[in-house]
Amino acid sequence: MSGQNTCVKIQKLPHGEGIDLPFYATTHAAGADLRAAIAEDVIIEAGEKALIKIGFAMALPDNFEAQIRPRSGLALKHGVTVLNSPGTIDADYRGEIGVILINHGKEAFTVQRGDRIAQMIIAPFVQADFQCVETLNETERGEGGFGSSGKN
């Protein structure tokens, strides 16, 4: 595997037994696949949402976060995505990880035990030192908002 590896400690929960740990499906994958650790199928009707547990808790190193993101295949084929994308898991959280899925498709979608439902990216972050000032430096863009930089 290329790049720098970071150790993330995972505690499997009883209902997560038999479910794979997060894993990278390919050598250069940025996101590790997460699987549903549910006892029974969960049917998400069109336009509805559901919290899907993944059967583990974890300890991230200081100054790292986990980002929970959708799987492109679920989004394209079924209209199912992560509702609060990307979901952020802070380094000091020790509870079970859950994924909020929403079905934007036209038909009900069934989540089964062991299904790959999302992906997780481990990323470093910095905490800003917020400072209140009287004025901000000027830029070429200035206060131009949504779409102000053009279409092409």
Image: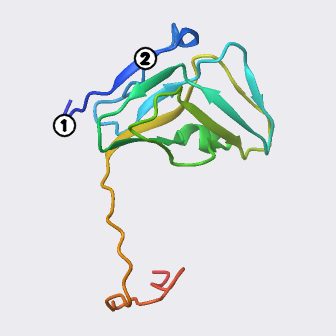
Give, as a three-letter code, the residue at label 2: Gln
Determine the image quadrant of residue 101. top right
Chain-order first, disc 1 or disc 2: 1
Check residue 11 in the rendering and tell me which mark sits there, or answer none. Answer: 2
Question: In x, y percent, where is residue 151?
Answer: 50, 81
Image point (51%, 48%), residue name? 86
Nearest-to-viewer mark from 1 and 2: 2
Q: Indicate the colouring scheme.
A: rainbow
Image point (46%, 28%), residue name? 94
- How many residues crowd mark 1 within 10 Å: few (<14), some (14–19), many (20+)? few
Q: Which residue occupies the foreground of this view, 20 or 11?
A: 11
The residue at which mark 1 appears reads as 4
| Quadrant position of the C terminus in the picture | bottom left
In-image side of 24 versus 36 (left or right): left
Question: In x, y percent, where is residue 42?
Answer: 74, 24
- SS for callout 1: loop
Q: CA distance from mark 1 to mark 2?
A: 23 Å
| Quadrant position of the N terminus in the picture | top left
Q: Is residue 127 above or below residue 150?
A: above
